[in-house]
Image (cartoon, rainbow, N blue to C red):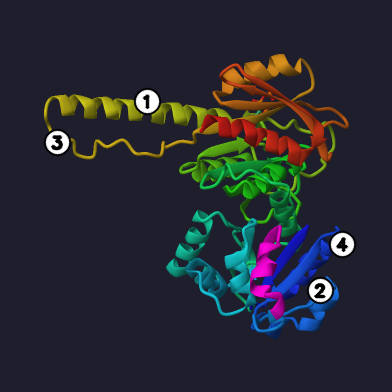
Amino acid sequence: MKIVLGVSGGIAAYKACELLRLFTESGHEVRVVPTRDALRFVGEPTWAALSGQPVTTEVWENVHEVPHVRIGQGADLVIVAPATADLMAKAAQGLTGDLLTTTLLTARCPVVFAPAMHTEMWDHPATRANVATLRERGAIVIDPASGRLTGADTGPGRLPDPAEIFEVCLRVLRGAPRDLAGRKVVVSAGGTREAIDPVRFIGNRSSGLQGYALARTAVARGAEVTLVAANVSLPDPAGAKVVRVESTAELREAVLSASADADVVVMAAAVADFRPAERHTSKIKKTPGEPSPINLTKNPDILAELGERRTAAQAGLRAQSETAADDKTQGETVAGGAVPERPPYPAVIAGFAAETDDVLANGAAKLARKGCDLLVVNQVGEHLAFGTADNAATILRADGGRAEIARGPKDDVADAVWDQVVTYF
Ligand code: CTP
């Protein structure tokens, strides 16, 4: 495939070298189009040597080849990494002035921006408006990662891991549908840990791979993703906002808070059903005689709670609109009686069920018990599902439907889940 790698003038330009290598090593033909300022960070010989292609910043070189039109027209994908605030402002306005901006105007293929800048610049209303404009026009703008920025400060603005940007680009190249564009999605991943004392905990074997695959694929399908990660040691998926938690109580708080204005919640995390009733503040010592038992207490069921909260919110809305209708028939002005367009709780709630026996029967009972719309049921055991790259599952729907997912990579399972989710919109 023909890739245009646009590089604008930010310190993260050096990371684009790794992105370039990932493309060339997997057989893609990459034309690097840096801005003049980008060359102050990484020089032309580096881009030329790594891409094996000529590198120009201006429209005035090789004019007979009409590069400002040809490069954009011939591309299968344009990725701009890093995308500075200035470059996105120009792209949003349709301004030209160099080869990269003209290429962005002539490209008719998918365009991905991977912004990197200081938090203040990313948060500025001008940048927010430009990003919104680019997204409205169909471009994919990957939210920057949070972390250490140039200098001592930290916050959102880091260029995501090049390997994760590459993953998003590959999915876009494969024609990932944009059916989650404009949707807010919350995914929980990993496994919760319940502290016994400062050094010990009760945990489970969940690696977080399936939840991370859900987040990664949702970003490529255009969603704004919050990933609540419980004890996962995987690289952050590009574009997802990652909230790290440890215990079920922390996971619950993070999921409920992110769900308040979300369209979809997928609970892929393996949540501990019980926690030690008492958390020792000092390490439990090995004393002579029988060890004392650890008493357990029940954890809240987050998935069931999401369903209950939604049912209550829907009942509240119904009552509100009935009152509004009554008031109208009585010819009164309805103050504050308007029904909000966005429902107060997610339109789609999905869970995962890991079962060892009677997989489908247990799954169907769980779907009804938890009040969710979709339940992804899979069999677990010694070498099944946990920590493996592959998965197979059956998706049970609250409306009685069912979809089988053949054994395959967890990204494919994730896409099959999103295929089901979008049918509810
Ligand atoms: N879940 C949850 N809160 C819990 C337990 C589970 O939100 N306290 C969610 C999980 O994230 C998953 C779904 O519920 O999406 C099913 O999890 P599972 O452990 O299979 O269900 P349990 O209710 O714990 O049932 P079981 O008796 O089989 O353990």
Spatial CA distance of label 3 from label 2 is 68 Å
- Kind of residue sitting beneath label 2: Gln
Answer whether labels 4 and 2 touch (C-beta < 8 Å).
Answer: no
Q: Which residue is mark 3?
A: 333
Q: Of tags 4 and 1, which is closer to the observer?
A: 4
Q: Residue 249 falls in which quadrant of the image? A: top right
Q: Which residue is mark 4?
A: 25
Say whether residue 293 is left or right of residue 417: right
- Kind of residue sitting beneath label 1: Ala
Q: Earlier in the sequence, mark 1 or mark 3?
A: 1
Spatial CA distance of label 1 from label 3 is 23 Å
Asked if residue 7 is among those painted magenta in the image, a careful observer would answer no
Q: Is residue 355 visible?
A: yes
Answer whether labels 3 and 2 touch (C-beta < 8 Å).
Answer: no
Q: Secondary structure at mark 2?
A: loop
Q: What range of the chain is rendered magenta?
A: 64-81
Answer whether labels 4 and 1 touch (C-beta < 8 Å).
Answer: no
Quadrant position of the N terminus in the picture: bottom right
Q: Secondary structure at mark 4?
A: helix
Task: Please name whichever residue, 75 or 345, is drawn nearer the observer in this view of the structure.
Answer: 75
Q: Earlier in the sequence, mark 3 or mark 4?
A: 4
Q: Is residue 305 visible?
A: no
Q: Earlier in the sequence, mark 4 or mark 2?
A: 4
Local packing at callout 1 (Cα closer than 10 Å; few below 14, some 14-19, many 20+) is few
Q: Secondary structure at mark 3?
A: loop
Task: Please name whichever residue, 212 or 95, is drawn nearer the observer in this view of the structure.
Answer: 95
Residue 112 versus residue 48 in the image, above or below? above
Q: Going 76% across and 15% down the picture, which residue do you hit?
A: 358
Local packing at callout 3 (Cα closer than 10 Å; few below 14, some 14-19, many 20+) is few
